[in-house]
Amino acid sequence: MNSTPLLVTRGLQTGYRSGGKKILVSGELPDLTIRAGRLICLLGPNGSGKSTLLRTLAGLQPALGGEVVIGGKSGLSSAERARQISLVLTDRVGGSNLNVSSLVALGRYPWSGWLGGLDDADRDIIRRGIAAADIGELLERKVHTLSDGESQKVMLARALVQDTPMLLLDEPTAHLDLPSRIRLMRLLHQLAREMNKGILLSTHELDLALQVADEVWLLQNAGPLHKGAPEDLVLGGVFEAAFEKEDVDFDRATGVFRIHREGSRRIRLIVTATGALAAFWTRRALQREGFAVVDEEGGNTIVIGEQGGRPIWVLDAGDGGRQYNSVADLIEALNHLRLP
């Protein structure tokens, strides 16, 4: 894997100009690096400047300070940049008279020029891009007939056909259903590895990002940018701090945001060797019902075990214990007993 940076920034400041004034979206950012074979996920709340940063790196808007160095050069022309960076935005695809096949083929423009002549090598790259994005069944469709999710996949195929060292994507999973989001994130991870591309994508899919990203860039509203391996950022408490003002809680143990805050009713959970999976989902159900799961002895206790290959729950509320065969039955009993 080539360790030479594809892109680096130095003293970068992002933002825009309005009424002759500079409006900074970020202060001076730490130096950022994109390398071949690496997948970077750009995370942060709405309004933190993710899209502005992406557009600045791609050259769609100028930096307000510092510089972006691509392939060891700064100040690239549009044509040179188009051979280094493929960009996929969330905007709807224009050109309603085009069919999908023609739109995807336009990805070869930086290499084929105005005449658009395609040789066998170009056609092979187009075939591989279509296969990678899994849009073979869409090729004859008119662009204006595509759903948002289909449109996003088509634009990914076009970016792959552009065949650049770097791929930048702004919210690529925004219009996709859950299975499609998972498949796309897995695909991008594979592309980084197998095609040795440097990929940067902005996303709100924190749980997926923590699974596939080699590195995370986490932007805060009016705050710094944190970067590092996702596991290091989680263990360092960065996610809790970044979203603290958003009034949400990040659970480091599971890597997800908690919808339900810890309740006031306390209950102890004891898990046998065979009950670990059931314990995870039982804890989720208890939190939803307003319980705080504790380790202290005494008080109300739930023991999770197994019987006949299936989990069982034994609730001891000072009455010798009662057995339940499902989480639903356990929760109904807890609510009926009105435990403190």
Image (cartoon, rainbow, N blue to C red):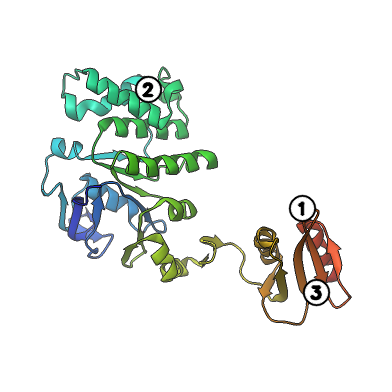
Q: Earlier in the sequence, mark 1 or mark 2?
A: 2
Measured Cα–Cα span from mark 1 to mark 2: 51 Å
Q: Quickly name the residue at label 1.
A: 309
Measured Cα–Cα span from mark 2 to mark 3: 61 Å
Q: Quickly name the residue at label 3.
A: 339
Q: How many marks?
A: 3
310 or 41: nearer the viewer: 310
Disc 3 element: loop
Q: Quickly name the residue at label 2.
A: 100
**Three-letter code for the amino acid on which mark 1 is drawn:** Gly
Measured Cα–Cα span from mark 3 to mark 1: 29 Å
Disc 2 element: helix
Does 186 sit above or below residue 227? Answer: above
Give the x, y percent position of residue 206.
46, 55
The answer, for residue 62, to whether it is visible in the render is: yes
**Three-letter code for the amino acid on which mark 2 is drawn:** Val
Q: Earlier in the sequence, mark 2 or mark 3?
A: 2
